[in-house]
Image (spheres, rainbow, N blue to C red):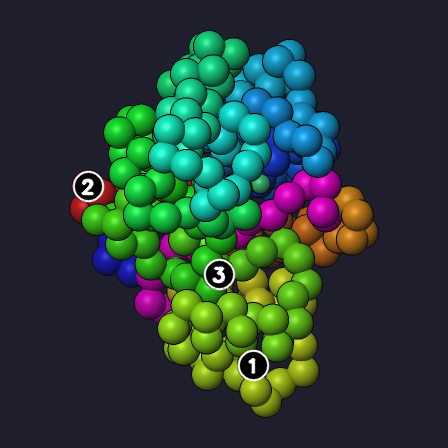
Amino acid sequence: MENKLIITTSWDDGHELDLRLAALLEKYGLKGTFYVPLRNAEKPVMNVEQLKELSKNHEIGGHTVNHIYLNSLGNSDAAYEIKECKVMLENQILKKVEAFCFPGGKYAQRDIEFVREAGFLFGRTTKLLMTKNETNTFLMDTTVQAYNHSNITLTKHCLKRKYLKPIFQNGFFINSNKNFVKLTEEYTNRLLQSGGVFHLWGHSWEIDEQNLWNELETVFKMLSEIKNAIYMNNSDCWKSLNTK
Ligand SMILES: [Zn+2]
C-alpha cells in the first residue's frame, strides 16, 4: 500500500453554495471537509440548520470565529479566533471538530501552536502543488485549487515558498496556461505511479462567480473514476498518514 493514492477535498468559507457543492461531491462518491467561520464580514455564512445538514455527510472544520487574517492580530485575539471557533462549531453541530484552516492561508509559528493547543489535528494552508503531507509540521498543504490560476501566478507561488520542483515538473515555463482540470489530470496520473495525496480545494462562492461548475463536475467525475484511489475527508487523510 506504499504507493496508495489518497484523494481529499476541502472547501472554505461556509457560503450556502457549499450545499450545492456537497451534493456534487456525493454524486461522485467524493469526501470533503468544509471550513466554516462563525461570521464573515465579507460573505454570508450558512445558518445553523444548513451547517447541521452539511455535517451529516461531510466533515466541518474551523476557519476562525470572524474570518480574520491571523497575522493582523495580537496574541490573545489570535488565540481566541482559533480556540473559540472550535468550541462554538462543536456546540452548533454537536460533533467533534478536528480540522482547522487559516483564513487567507496567513499564519505565524505562534498560530500553529494555538492550533495544537486548541486540540485540532492540523492547520490547512493554501500552499498549492503539494502531494505529500509532513505530519510532524501540523500543517496540511494542498495540490490544486478549483480556480484557473495563470502559469505566472503558479510560478510566483512556488518561488515565494522556495519550492521549485512543480515549476519544472509542470512545465510552467514552456506550456500555455493549464486550467485546473488539466492540472488535476497531470497530478493524478503522476500520483498513480508514485502514490501520495491529491488535495483539491476551493470556495463554492468563487466557483459560482467564475462560472466553474461544469469544470468542477468534470474534475469530480475524473477523480471518481480513478482505480484504487482512496477517498477521504481531510482529518481521515491526516490520521491515515499518521498511522502508517
Ligand atoms: Zn477563507
Say which residue label 3 marks: 128
Q: Say which of 196 and 132 sits in front.
A: 132
Position in image of residue 159 (x %, y %) = 46, 75
Q: Residues within 10 Å of mark 2 (few under 14, many from 20)?
A: few
Instruction: Give the distance between the C-alpha atoms of the residues marked 1 and 3, in whole angstroms.
Output: 14 Å
Q: Amino acid at mark 2?
A: Thr
Sequence order check, earlier mark of 1 and 3: 3
The relative height of residue 103 versus residue 47 in the rendered view (above or below) is below
Say which residue label 2 marks: 243
Q: Quadrant of ligand 1?
A: top right
Residue at figure coordinates x 68%, y 51% from the top left: 216
Q: Secondary structure at mark 3?
A: loop
Residue at figure coordinates x 37%, y 29% from the top left: 76
Judged by depth in the image, the label closer to the viewer, 3 or 2, is 3
Sequence order check, earlier mark of 1 and 2: 1
Q: Amino acid at mark 1?
A: Phe
Instruction: Give the distance between the C-alpha atoms of the residues marked 1 and 2, in whole angstroms.
Output: 35 Å
- Can residue 142 be seen at all in this image of the molecule? yes
